[in-house]
Amino acid sequence: MKGMLVKDMRLMLQQKRFFIIFFLISIWLHYIVGGIFVIAYLTFICSSFALSTISYDEFDNGFSFLMTLPVERRAYVRGKYIFGILVGGGAWIIGVLLSLGFLFIQGTSVAFGEYFQALMICIPIFLCFLAIMIPFLLKFGAEKGKLISIAVMMTVAVIGYFVVSWMERTGVDIDQLIRALESFWLGIGELIILVVSAAVTYISFLISCAIMKKKEF
């Protein structure tokens, strides 16, 4: 698996110019929309680049060659999840340091509780992003997998929209509900969300292993 991680890292380093461009764009975006968006932007862009290594593996019957190496299919899948988490988590840390640096330079004061909540929510979302994308990419390939996963996320967004609309029609005070959740969120809420997202990621890993086991090259 270590060899797979090294391979993926070398593949990503071939795109170092794009990472430099995204970093510069992130600095520019900080002055427009704020630091929290920069953190989410870096995290998801880098996570997407990490997933692009599956496309490279698939290109020109690459899987057929990789599976001739002394690498188990389960180890290959495990490597993709670990690599995605390392890249996304590393980008999250860089984004946090960048945001804190700007806040220090500008002398801006922020409410720690709200800032902490906004920072932490990026982690479970990007874990769920990996959990959704990797099985689809392995099952349907790079092109079809991306389209299907986008369709799934759009479906979830539409369902969320209708749920919010239904709550508004039935007289549910959404603002009051959000405030109640915020009072519960700090500490316990983050822990619950992280545990659930970790469980979702593990289930996704098992599904991906089953997909990879049945895959023919």
Image (cartoon, rainbow, N blue to C red):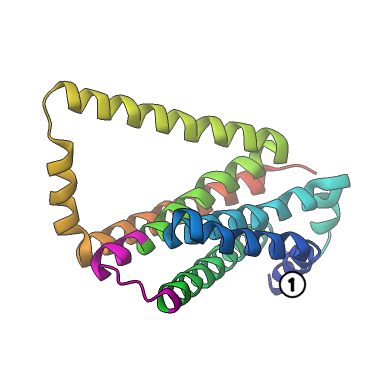
Q: Say what secondary structure mark 1 lies in.
A: helix
Query: Which residue occupies the extreme front position in the image?
Result: 106
The residue singled out by tag 1 in the image is 6
Visible residue check, residue 81: no
Residue 38 image point, x, y percent: 50, 59
Q: Residue furthest right?
A: 60
Quadrant where the C terminus is found in the figure: top right
The image shows residue 194 at horizontal and vertical percentages of: 34, 61
Image location of residue 98, percent across then percent down: 51, 72
Which image quadrant is residue 67 in? bottom right
Identify the residue at image location x=88%, y=46%: 60
Q: Would residue 42 be found to the left or right of residue 159 on screen? A: right
Vertical position of residue 109 compared to residue 34: above or below? below
Task: Look at the image and tell me in which quarter the N terminus lies.
Answer: bottom right
Front-most of residues 203 and 83? 83
How many C-alpha atoms fall within 10 Å of the one at disc 1: few (<14), some, or many (≥20)? few
> Which residue is at 41% across, 78% downward?
104
- Type of amino acid at the residue the image marks with label 1: Val
Q: Left or right of 15: which side holds 43?
A: left
The correct choice, above or below, for 176 with respect to 38 in the image is above
- Point 43% across, 52% down: residue: 125
Q: In this picture, which residue range is highlighted in magenta?
A: 105-118
Q: Is residue 163 visible?
A: yes
